[in-house]
Image: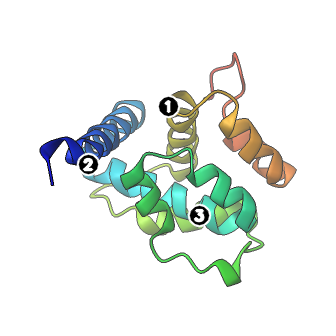
Amino acid sequence: MSTQNLEVLDTTLHKTHQWIDSISVATHLDRHTSYQALRGVLQALRDRLPQDEAAHFSAQLPLLIRGIFYEGYRPSAVPVPLSRQEFLDRVDSKIVANRSVDVLAITRQVLRVMDELLSEGEMDKVALVLPKEFQNLFPLKGAVIS
């Protein structure tokens, strides 16, 4: 196998670090906790989405992040009818930090970073599939989430 065939691995590793670094800057968390936050949001989102939407969404993710998204996935058990608070609780359960964290703010920032890094409109499509109580977790176009 030539080294050129491994470019896909180098690229996905670079993109994954870019995602984690962007989340770290946005959330003011260390890289490890930022990874946990990304993993928590991705997997809570995955479990809340219908299968078809999860598959479409995951196709937009870098290869390594797609693996994180699908880690432990049970397609026969989705979508899980999570309330907004249960969704946030799932994200929180994945974050192990040395200090208390604001899971709502972190979730919003992770979704904002994802919105910036994915193709335009992708996160809007995801948001529209979810119940209305989830809408304010997602970035509003042209607005800053506080």
Q: Secondary structure at mark 1?
A: helix
Corner quadrant of residue 46 = bottom right
Q: Count neighbours of disc 1 (C-alpha within 10 A) and say few if under 14, some if 14 to 19, many if 20 or more.
A: some
As drawn, 40 above or below 18 = below
Q: Earlier in the sequence, mark 1 or mark 2?
A: 2
Residue 1 in percent (x, y) is at 15, 55
Q: Nearer the viewer, residue 92 or 48?
A: 48
Q: Nearer the viewer, residue 66 or 6?
A: 6
Q: Nearer the viewer, residue 112 or 46?
A: 46
Disc assigned to residue 68: none
What residue sits 32% from the left and 52% below the top? Answer: 33
What residue sits 63% from the left and 28% below the top? Answer: 145
CA separation, marks 3 and 1?
Answer: 19 Å
Q: What residue does disc 3 label?
A: 44
Identify the amino acid type marked 1.
Leu
Q: Earlier in the sequence, mark 2 or mark 3?
A: 2
Q: Count neighbours of disc 2 (C-alpha within 10 A) and say few if under 14, some if 14 to 19, many if 20 or more.
A: few
